[in-house]
Image (cartoon, rainbow, N blue to C red):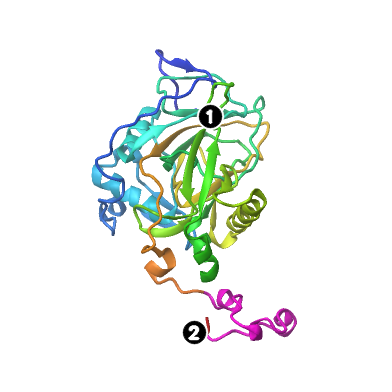
Amino acid sequence: MATSASSSREYYPSSVPRPYTDSKLKHLAGTKADPAKKSLFSAAKQVVDYTPAIGTEIVGLQLKDLNEQQAEDLALLIAERGVVFFRDQDLTPEQQRELGLRWGNINAQVTGRGAQAQPFPFPDVQVFRTDKNSLQAPNRWHQDHSANETPASITFLMVRETPPNGGGDTVWSSLYSAYDKLSPAFRARLEGLETLQEGAYQPHDASYVPMRGTHPLIRTHPVTRWRHLYVNDSWAKQVKGFRREESDLLINFLQQHISSGVDYQVRFKWTPNSVALWDNRSTQHSAIWDFFPETRYGTRVVVHGDKSFFDPKSKSRAEALGIPITPSWRRDIANGLEDVVGRDAWVLQGFKQKPYGSL
């Protein structure tokens, strides 16, 4: 195991709320970055994009050695790429905590499923250990702490021990791309909608009050200024102003759209002492609990720092970056009766592409 707690460690039972650092930020992490990220990239041996939409690995760089400019550039990269990976990190939990504090306020709360008293000297670093004695969580897509009035911005997860025979991967889905894949007419109908969210992130008794917040269903990212969906069926309980049945239909559709979008997802295979840093504003993620009865152990810091908002003048990522729309996407939009005549005939007759400008 890569780390151990100090001799002066304290015990934080799962029923005790974890402290929350709450100080006024000097600036939002990533907003003072170099758009080219020269300081960060020049220090790495290699930078590898896993997919066009989401996921980048930085090779040959130790997170503990980042200077202020590199940390700022990394915050921008996380915002743009959704999740950034590092392997073979020599990083103590205290160093992990210190880096998290560069990006905002930090908060960690033990989740209720299988949580045990954890010995640790840092109350705002979450320690997790899943083994043969643990109740494993369901494979649910979600965002960390999205129900808070000031939701999570970045999650910093270091897995220090992995199952010897594999398993325990994590999958992320891009909410930038999920927004871009919706039709313009459907996007327009989502503008101005808000979700009522509630999150019971830890074991609790009758006195515990869950985190609650109201958030725009379409959100503008505060760093990239790109539009993205901001919804998950774990914590979004209802669309404001909708009947429950109406709300369930919409949330369920959007969640299915996000979780089934294999062309804008990335899956990461953890190795000992690997790190994932992801943007909770513009991604959803799901852990895969397929390694019972083996052990998975690590530490997590959750960064908060900005409130959700929607700017009607903001653009989608595809618009901002000039990403072309595929012909098959355009063909799927019906603008008149001629677009639905013999709708499924192309399956038998072969795909007949519409002209690129026919939307």
Check disc 1 and report the residue beneath it.
128
The three-letter amino acid code for the residue at tag 1 is: Phe
Q: Say whether residue 221 is left or right of residue 112.
A: left
Q: In terms of secondary structure, where does tag 2 sit?
A: loop
Question: Where does the magenta region start and end?
Answer: 326-355
At horizontal 45% and vertical 24% (from top left) the residue drawn is 18
Q: Is residue 288 at all visible to an observer of this figure?
A: yes
Q: Which mark is residue 315?
A: none
Marks 1 and 2 close (CB-CB < 8 Å):
no
Check disc 2 and report the residue beneath it.
357
Structural distance between the alpha carbons of marks 1 and 2: 51 Å
- Extreme-right residue of the structure: 348
Q: Say whether residue 264 is left or right of residue 66.
A: right
Residue 243 locus on image (x, y percent): 63, 50
276 lies above or below 341: above
Q: Is residue 341 magenta?
A: yes
At horizontal 27% and vertical 52% (from top left) the residue drawn is 33
The three-letter amino acid code for the residue at tag 2 is: Gly
Residue 244 locus on image (x, y percent): 64, 48
